[in-house]
Each structure stands twice: as structure tokens, then as C-alpha cells.
Amino acid sequence: MSHQHGHGATARLAVSTVIFALSPDEGAAAPSLRIPLVRRLREPGAGRWALPGGWLPVDEGLDAAAARTLAETTGLAPRYLEQLYTFGAPDRSPDERVVSVVYWALVHSDEVQRAVADENVHWFDEDELPELAFDHREIIDYALWRLRTKLQYSRIAHALLGETFTMAELRGVHEAVLRRRLDPANFRRTMEASGTLIDTGQRLAGTPHRPPALYRFDTGAGPAASDRPATTALQRTNP
Amino acid sequence: MSHQHGHGATARLAVSTVIFALSPDEGAAAPSLRIPLVRRLREPGAGRWALPGGWLPVDEGLDAAAARTLAETTGLAPRYLEQLYTFGAPDRSPDERVVSVVYWALVHSDEVQRAVADENVHWFDEDELPELAFDHREIIDYALWRLRTKLQYSRIAHALLGETFTMAELRGVHEAVLRRRLDPANFRRTMEASGTLIDTGQRLAGTPHRPPALYRFDTGAGPAASDRPATTALQRTNP
DNA sequence: CTTCTTAGAGTCGGTATGACTCGAAGTGCT
DNA sequence: AGCACTTCGAGTCATACCGACTCTAAGAAG
């Protein structure tokens, strides 16, 4: 029953990645989400902006191909990388059938500074995206939805921050992603109750007001990521 | 930057589906989840059980290929079908590189009766799975996790039930999927509060106790499926 | 030493949920 | 007919969580 379609022609496999970073902190301005896009140099869609990606080499895993793609574009390694969805409508690319396994990634904004600066690579603000090639606009919209949804039940915000951070910085990440103001007191309560924050004991000096505490993320245990089943062995430890 | 790997050899694309149905209702026994598998007739993995699937034809969409695969196996159309994940480790299949776009589906148990009966197709109970070919065991575990997770915040249980059903039947579906007893009173309260149930006004007669009400699912509006972003147009209607 | 700003703790009310109780409404047995 | 038995389905109570809000703490700036 399986494999009944023979070894005839099939679609070509590409891997693309939607990369997110926060805009570099420029004073008191609220940070915003930014996405790097590459200008297509060849047809189809030459001149248009598109997601970074490439054909899948026969001997490379999907995750590895996504990470490599990302490194070639930003020059840096992702802090977070997860498969998003596979897009394969027959007409999504003219001329030939292309199936794209799309990933999404988070990188730290500090590292964006050191990233590839090229006239054919540009970081766009989330709400100032240009016209995109193929179905890449839908893909980005889906990735944005996933990022926003996941931020609320997972703890991925640290992938956009440095080693230590203040509660206000962490809240700023959430506000930028969710595009919504959050109550500082309630946000603090929720984060502290999550048990994923560690107070370093240090305080950030030099602010024109009361110095805030600096936190680290608890990279150890804590509530599992919950976007994947625990391994069978780990799952048994639950009850 | 994109497409930089040329038009050389690439992986072959397959589409597979994890299909779920409830065991046929045999008296008072609690229903359980069942999954149809096909016996592999050729190498690699000949003789082993595997997920139904096939190579992706060049001119067929991913969803369509999954639905066709499912129809060829069960002889029926899925009540629910959603992409699960794309598996593409370089060594998951010997001999050649295969990337599988995997879907998961729900079908109604009544229809399983009319499904394909073949010595090479067999419905296995969720906890009595045989040794599987390739990485299909991991795939099924992931699909099970997704089904259980999604059942709790979405309303997909109706895809496993008939047109009308009692509250106890609906609860039975949840209990079978979650493998956990649920309090009847609390379950009723939660479901009624969700606003997705419509009381048909009819009651199921012939039971050896108080006759239960028959419900339908509200196929119209209600809380959006929330596993996908609303279309851009709809999203704008949010305040 | 007063004023300004943000940090961070605490209060209050509404809502969701688990555990539990109890009358309702059928069938089947005596 | 009447009693026992079963599940249906409504209701109660305690607790956890979360949004809105208040208030004090601790620094810089003037």
C-alpha cells in the first residue's frame, strides 16, 4: 500500500527559517520585533525579499540545514530553533514544485549588531514588511502567531535576552512580542510564581530611579517545555 | 543566498498519516484509541508494520496526499486532518534519504466497521502496538501527545463521535484519549460553559436508568480553533 | 531635602476548577 | 405496585489564578 507511487518525479525540498530578534535597544524606546530577509537574485521572484533558506542537501538533517541557513544569513547561531510547518501547495512556486520545511528561530539582539551586513540582507520591522516572494508572507504571519502563542505558556523569552536582565527588560520582551502593555506588578507575580527566574543578588546601578534586581533564567529543571512529549523515560517520573 | 545548493540530488518526499479512531462500542467497556497500520511488503523493513503513506506526487498538495493516503487505507474520509511534523533525519531510512511529512487524522469509529479489511491492514490498540518500521514509533508517540494536548484546549472530540451523542459518550472520548477518569459533574459544567454543545431536546431511551439528553456540536461560530492564526481579515476584528 | 521615577510588595474581586452532595428519572426485580 | 439500582444533571464549597489597583522603597536630579 505504501510507496505505491513508484520512484517517479517528486517535489524539490527546501528549508527556510523565520528569524526573530528584538530591535537594538535605543534608549527608552520600546523594542520591536525584527526579521531578516534576503533579496532574491534569481528567478522566480528576483528582486523580491524572501526568507533565508536553501535546498536541502541529501546528507544533512532538517534541523542542521535550518541552523546552517540561519548562520549563513545572520552569521550567528540561533538561541532557539524549532520546526514551524511544512508548506507544499503545488502552485506556491511557479515553474517547479517546491516543498519548504520552515523553521523559526530566536536570536539575541546584541548579536544582530555583529551580524551579516549586506545590501541583499535587511532586517525589517515586524510591521514594516515589504512585499514578499511566493507565500512567504503567510509563512511569517504563521510564525508570528506561533511565537506569540508559545510565549504565553513556554519560557522562550530568554532567547531574546542576555545572560542577566531586569524584570522590566523581560516584560519589555513580552510586550514587544504580544504588542500589548502588561501590568508590571502582575507580570512580576506571574514570573516569580513560574519558578524559572533566579535572582542573582546583583542590582543594576546607574538608573535615574530605584535600582532593579538582575535575574537569570533557571536553565535547569522547572516546568518542561511542553511543546514536545517528554522522552519516555522522563515521562515515567511524573506521577 | 537562497537556493545556493544548486539542483543536485535531494531527499525523496513521502507523506504519512497517523490515524486515530475509537474502538467500536462493545457494551459497557470503556472505549480505547486505535490506530491502523499497514504491513510493509518490500524492503527496507519488509514484514514490519508501518504508518500508511506514500510518495508525494509532483502535482498533489500535501493535505490532499494525506487525505488520499488515508482513504486508500481506511476506505473513508477523515473527519479531522492536520499536519503533525516533518521527520527528516538523514539515517531514518536505510539506503536512501527519505523526508516524511506526517499528518494525523481522526475518523469515526462507526466508519471503521466499513473500512478496508485486509490481512495487510490491521487496527492496533494504542497500548498494544507492534514493533514498527523506521522511526514510526516515535512519530506515533508524538501524534498521541499532540492529540492529548489539543483535546484539552480545542474541540476535536466530535470528530470521533456521531452526529448526536450523550454527555457520557463525550466524556468517554475524553477519558479514552487522556487515559484518565473525569468527574461527570465537572465535565458537564465545563462543556456546557464552552458553548459548543447544542441540546437537541431529544433523549436517549432504552437505558436502564434515567435517559440522558442528546447533544450536537455547534459547527458554527464559537471560540476559534486556535491552532492557527485567524485570517488577516478576521484578526483585524479583534479590539 | 524635596521631587520625580521606577521597583517591588500587597489587596480585592471575578472566574475557573477539583471534590463533593443530592434530588431526578428511568429500568428491572419482587 | 413498589422498592432497589443506576446514571443524569443541578448545586455547593474551597482553592488557585489573574486583572485592576494601591502603597511603600530606593535611587537620581534639582
Image: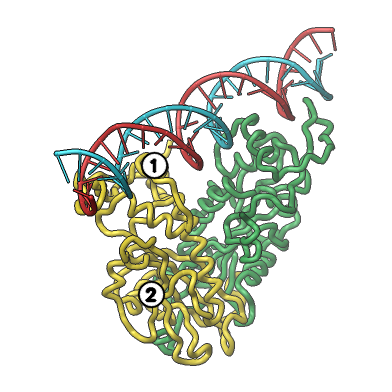
Chain colours: A green, B yellow, C red, D cyan
Identify the secondary structure beneath mark 1: helix
Contact? badges 1 and 2 (CB < 8 Å) = no
Q: Which mark is residue B185?
A: 1
Residue type beneath disc 1: Ala
Q: Position of residue C17 (x, y in %)?
A: 48, 41
- Observer-side mark, 1 or 2, equals 1
Considering depth in this image, is A160 or B123 the residue closer to the camera? Answer: B123
Residue A220 lies left or right of residue B65; in this view the side is right
Considering depth in this image, is B211 or B169 the residue closer to the camera? Answer: B211
Q: Chain of mark 1?
A: B
Please name the residue that numbered disc 2 is placed on: B65
Considering depth in this image, is B85 or B180 the residue closer to the camera? Answer: B180
Q: As displayed, is residue B66 above or below residue B153?
A: below
Q: Earlier in the sequence, mark 1 or mark 2?
A: 2
* Quarter of the image where one finds residue A181: top right
Q: As displayed, is residue A8 above or below residue A84?
A: below
